[in-house]
Image (tube, rainbow, N blue to C red):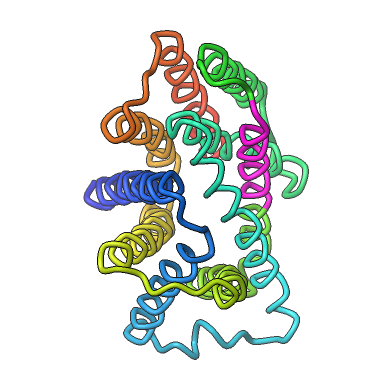
Amino acid sequence: MKILLLGILLICLNGFTGSTFDTITKFISLNNYNWYHYYSIGLTTSLIILLIFLKFQGGIKKHIILKKKQYYFLPIIRGFHFAFITPIIFYSLKYIPINIFTTLLMTTPFFLIILAKFILNEKLNYISWIAIIIGFIGVIIVLQPTNAPINVYIFLVLLVAITNALSFTAVHKYSYMATTYGFTFYGFLPPIIISFLFFFTDPIIPSGKEFLLFTSSGITVMISAWAFTAAYHIAGKYSSVISPFIFLQILWGTLYGIIFFSEKISNLSILGIFVIIVSGSIAVYNRNK
């Protein structure tokens, strides 16, 4: 029971810190900062913290130096994928409400289940398919009542959800190539390098407030990634029980939007969010079970 409760707490921590990262990102994007200033400083801080942590977790070499040269390919490709989606996340949060952003991002588990069917050859029964279809209907319900017009960023966030699902599926299939920390390290490295390439063409000296915002964002996204990994590592056979708590991030995103950005949410949107949470919980529970 203690293991189960700890797994649930870690998943909740993942959702809370993930939404906190999104909130800070939206605030920075609305205040006309450049994404490369933000990510170069914030993600570098998080990577340094990760390396310090690894120093006390069996050594840096154990997790960063992979057994075979070909094993570097997938972790680095995932890093370039992260470098591709970080500007999308930055600008999407600038132009669409955070509750819509979070709701769209939480379609990742649906795409993950679909990809597991076709890539990992997992069996998917009719309950999962019905839950997935109903979940996407919930997304349509959420999007329909928004005052903001449907724009390209909504489709870009869906693209992020799809590519995230593909990335998670690849890690699941080829997990032997690197440790979780190794995948995390090489996931952060390419976006940092690319951000600094832009940073050097337009350098800034951040103020104390800016530095605090950038670094706190990097720390929260690192905690979010760690909590997600630790939850499933600890939970083991209880993963089917803790998985539905992933969708609590929608509630955090909605609350952050209301509190910090005065976003409004209609009763129909609340219904759509409820549909997504329930159908998504059924889908991931049924898959993990």
Q: Is residue 276 left or right of residue 178?
A: left
For the point 41% across and 89% down, the residue is 59
Q: Main secondary structure of the magenta part?
A: helix
Nearer to me, 47 or 192: 192
Give the total of numbered labels: 0
Q: Position of residue 128 (x, y in %)?
A: 61, 26
Nearer to me, 105 or 166: 105
Q: Position of residue 129 (x, y in %)?
A: 66, 24
For the point 61% across and 22% down, the residue is 136
Q: Quadrant of residue 242?
A: top left
Q: Quadrant of residue 229?
A: bottom left
Q: Quadrant of residue 87?
A: bottom right
- In the displayed structure, 285 sits above or below 272; it is below
Q: Is residue 168 left or right of residue 253?
A: right
Q: Position of residue 151 (x, y in %)?
A: 65, 28
Residue lying at the far top in this picture: please name it. 267
For the point 60% across and 70% down, the residue is 198
For the point 32% across and 63% down, the residue is 210
Q: Position of residue 112 (x, y in %)?
A: 63, 42
Q: Is residue 142 left or right of residue 211?
A: right
- In the displayed structure, 74 sits above or below 128; it is below
Q: Is residue 163 a member of the stretch shown in magenta?
A: yes
Q: Which residues are magenta?
A: 151-166
- In the displayed structure, 88 sits above or below 103; it is below
Q: Is residue 110 a member of the stretch shown in magenta?
A: no
